[in-house]
Amino acid sequence: MQAKTDHSGNIIVIGLFAIVVTLLSIGAIGEMIAGFVARVRNFSGHRAKEQYEEPAYQSEDLH
């Protein structure tokens, strides 16, 4: 019985870990895409890059 309990506990831990890794990887991919978009906009013009560098959500996350 104890081994069974440990096994199910491990599944829960692995599941939570997988969710965290998935969320982190989604965030990393989003940052890569955002960086690529910023680079493309930089070639188009500096004004578009300035607008991108100061998004509204960034100030909310920092505080």
Image (tube, rainbow, N blue to C red):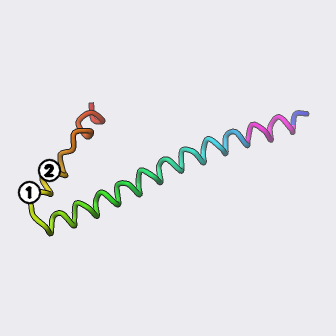
Report the predominant secondary structure element of the magenta stretch. helix
Which residue is at 86% across, 38% downward? 4
Residue type highlighted by circle 1: Arg
42 displayed left or right of 27 = left
- Kindly check if marks 2 and 1 are in contact, taking CB atoms under 8 A apart as contact: yes
Quadrant holding the C terminus: top left
Give percent across and percent down for residue 32. Answer: 35, 60
Left or right: 42, with 19 as reference point:
left
- Is residue 4 rendered magenta in the image? yes
33, 13: nearer the viewer: 33
Compare residues 46 and 28 and report the one nearer the observer: 46
> In the figure, residue 49 lies in which quadrant?
bottom left
Front in this rendered view, residue 6 or 37: 37
Q: Quadrant of residue 20?
A: top right
The residue segment tinted magenta is 3-10
Real-space CA distance between mark 2 and mark 1, rounded to the nearest whole angstrom: 6 Å
Q: Which residue is mark 2?
A: 51
